[in-house]
Image (cartoon, grey):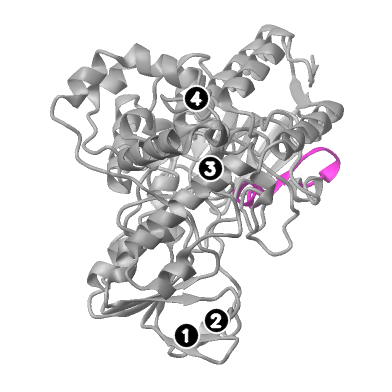
């Protein structure tokens, strides 16, 4: 397979209508619409060797989506939905990557993508009203529009432990996994982190490792996924109901095809609520969270659901002390990303698995043979796996070297936390659009639904600018500040701020400003806001002609 652009001189400098950074779900769809609907001269710059975005890099053992497969895909055309047939309720990394390659081929997208091109700077040229984009390979492009499609969970976070390079074994981060895999057979393994990726990786690694030590700072709630192969007739039935699925997701708070009933948990009788929760537990997945509609707004209701999960954990773990260590108490259920799992808690009943609590006895340093804790205790390891998450929402954007008007860098503009209007634009950076940027629902939703909404809005906005002969469009400062305040106010009406170390706030990154980044009022309300702004002639954006 040839790689577009590789044989051309990267220093020639192209003139384009738009540059898109990233070839995952967002970048591929944005490319398709700009090229086919608007007829734009557009290219995608992708750091990886292939399409896939998050699903190209995240190949760790057990990597799997927490949205159900027939909802975690493009819905802008029935043809793709009918041609692609999913195999499992929750698609794994390999299947999602195959799907995105299928879409790239089916839509003939590769000819407009430069692979192995990592962007190192994007500088706004005020006199030319253009972005000057440069890659690490020296490729330069001048473009009217710059669109970031870099994902919300793409910038890996590896703790800066003392004596890091003294470790003689191998170490890996779940977000930058070797493409040829890792063999854990007869290996002594330590994994740091019990967030979503750790919860997925731990059961798989434990099956082949000689010994696995799990280092846990914060116990996590998790709900069984109940993953299974899809029935043979599933695809045929789905194809007959595409419009129904699409309609359900369009009015849903989280972009899933189900909504919580208007029922308060704490006002429901114990007998009925136990039956509802048990049914939800057996169905599994994120549907469990939607058993009632007040889980993130009522402390009493949340406590009842949290107690239910803790009871399930205690019933699963054989060792009472291990169970106690695994019980989450420091945050209400759902205020951190709610993981779903396959035999996560059951894994701690294995003879080759040990749980170490590092909340009160944290990691001090690495040593040649493994890990040293503050107490002086040592944990031996041939391999260390960092399931320590990401510099979420902003990390990948700030790495692009974006410079706006008056040489203002994006890092300087966001030094006190990200400020955007709708998560789409930010003041001081004309003709810059961010797909699922901070201030949008993004990570609180089924991502393809949020992505499609963003991409279609951006496309329509660019078309509007073309029709009126606009040279620039830029978020107004007042609109940006008001929206940022609104995002915070909406979050404060929920239990979300009660989570410690939540990456929703940037709390997992030392020194990162603490500000709630995703929009928590729901994708349905966000879509309505965006539609009203478009109908008003894009009020809140300054357009120059």
- Residue on which disc 4 sits: 452
- Residue on which disc 3 sits: 151
Quadrant of the drawing holding the C terminus: top right
For the residue carrying disc 2, how many other residues have a C-alpha within 10 Å: few (<14), some (14-19), or many (20+)? some
Query: Where 291 falls versus 154 (above or below)?
Result: above
Query: Where 500 falls versus 66 (above or below)?
Result: below
SS label for mark 2: helix
Along the line of sight, which residue is nearer the eye, 155 or 275?
Answer: 275
Chain-order first, disc 1 or disc 3: 3
Chain-order first, disc 1 or disc 4: 1
Q: Report x, y in % for residue 542.
A: 81, 20
The answer to the question of whether label 1 and label 3 lie on touching residues, with beta carbons closer than 8 A, is no
State how far apart marks 1 and 2 are (Cα): 6 Å
State how far apart marks 2 and 3 are (Cα): 28 Å
Tell me if 249 is positioned left or right of 336 in this view: left
- Span shown in magenta: 394-409
- 57 within the magenta span: no
Along the line of sight, which residue is nearer the eye, 136 or 277?
Answer: 277
SS label for mark 3: loop
For residue 164, which numbered disc appears in the image? 2
Quadrant of the drawing holding the N terminus: top left
Tell me if 136 is positioned left or right of 447 in this view: right
- Residue on which disc 1 sits: 167
SS label for mark 4: helix
Chain-order first, disc 3 or disc 4: 3
SS label for mark 1: loop
The residue positioned 54% from the left and 30% from the top of the image is 293
The answer to the question of whether label 1 and label 2 lie on touching residues, with beta carbons closer than 8 A, is yes
The answer to the question of whether label 3 and label 4 lie on touching residues, with beta carbons closer than 8 A, is no
State how far apart marks 1 and 4 are (Cα): 44 Å
Chain-order first, disc 2 or disc 3: 3
């Amino acid at each position: 397979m040839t790689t577009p652009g590789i044989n051309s001189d990267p220093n020639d400098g192209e003139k384009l209508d738009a540059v898109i950074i990233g070839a995952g779900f967002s970048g591929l769809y944005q490319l398709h619409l700009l090229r086919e609907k608007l007829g734009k001269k557009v290219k995608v710059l992708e750091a990886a060797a292939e399409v896939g975005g998050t699903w190209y890099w995240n190949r760790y053992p057990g990597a799997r989506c927490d949205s159900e497969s027939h909802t975690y895909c493009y819905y802008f055309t029935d043809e793709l939905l009918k041609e692609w047939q999913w195999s499992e309720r929750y698609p794994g990394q390999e299947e999602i990557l195959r799907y995105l390659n299928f879409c790239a081929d089916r839509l003939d997208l590769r000819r407009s993508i430069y692979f192995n091109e990592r962007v190192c700077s994007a500088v706004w040229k005020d006199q030319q009203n253009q972005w000057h984009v440069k890659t690490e390979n020296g490729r330069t492009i001048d473009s009217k529009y710059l669109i970031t499609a870099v994902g919300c969970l793409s910038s890996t976070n590896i703790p800066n432990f003392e004596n890091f390079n003294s470790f003689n074994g191998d170490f890996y981060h779940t977000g930058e996994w070797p493409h040829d895999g890792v063999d854990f057979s007869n290996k002594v393994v330590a994994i740091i982190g019990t967030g979503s990726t750790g919860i997925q990786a731990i059961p798989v690694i434990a099956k082949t490792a000689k010994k696995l030590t799990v280092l846990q700072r914060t116990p996590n709630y998790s709900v069984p996924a109940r993953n299974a192969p899809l029935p043979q007739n599933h695809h045929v039935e789905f194809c007959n109901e595409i419009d129904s699925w699409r309609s359900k997701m369009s009015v849903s708070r989280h972009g899933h095809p189900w909504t919580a009933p208007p029922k308060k948990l704490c006002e429901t009788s114990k007998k009925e609520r136990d039956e509802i929760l048990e049914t939800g537990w057996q169905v599994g997945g994120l549907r469990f969270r939607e058993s009632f509609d007040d889980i993130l707004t009522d402390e009493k209701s949340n406590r009842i659901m949290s107690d239910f999960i803790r009871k399930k954990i205690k019933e699963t773990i054989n060792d009472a002390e291990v169970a106690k260590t695994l019980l989450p108490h420091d945050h209400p259920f759902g205020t951190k990303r709610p993981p779903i799992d396959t035999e996560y808690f059951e894994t701690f009943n294995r003879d080759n698995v040990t749980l170490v609590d590092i909340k009160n006895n944290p990691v001090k340093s690495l040593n040649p043979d493994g890990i040293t804790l503050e107490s002086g205790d040592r944990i031996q390891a041939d391999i260390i796996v960092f399931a320590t998450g990401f510099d979420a929402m902003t990390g990948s954007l700030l790495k692009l070297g974006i410079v706006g008007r008056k040489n203002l860098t994006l890092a300087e503009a966001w030094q006190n936390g990200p400020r955007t209007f709708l998560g789409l634009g930010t003041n001081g950076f004309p003709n810059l659009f961010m797909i699922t940027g901070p201030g949008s629902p993004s990570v609180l939703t089924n991502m393809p639904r949020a992505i499609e909404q963003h991409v279609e809005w951006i496309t329509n906005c660019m078309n509007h600018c073309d029709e009126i002969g606009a040279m620039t469009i830029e978020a107004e400062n007042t609109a940006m500040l008001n929206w940022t305040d609104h995002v915070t106010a909406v979050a404060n009406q929920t239990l979300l701020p009660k989570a410690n170390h939540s990456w929703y706030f940037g709390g997992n990154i030392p020194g990162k400003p603490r500000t709630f980044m995703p929009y928590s009022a729901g994708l349905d309300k966000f879509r309505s806001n965006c539609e009203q702004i478009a109908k008003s002639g894009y009020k809140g954006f300054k357009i120059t002609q």
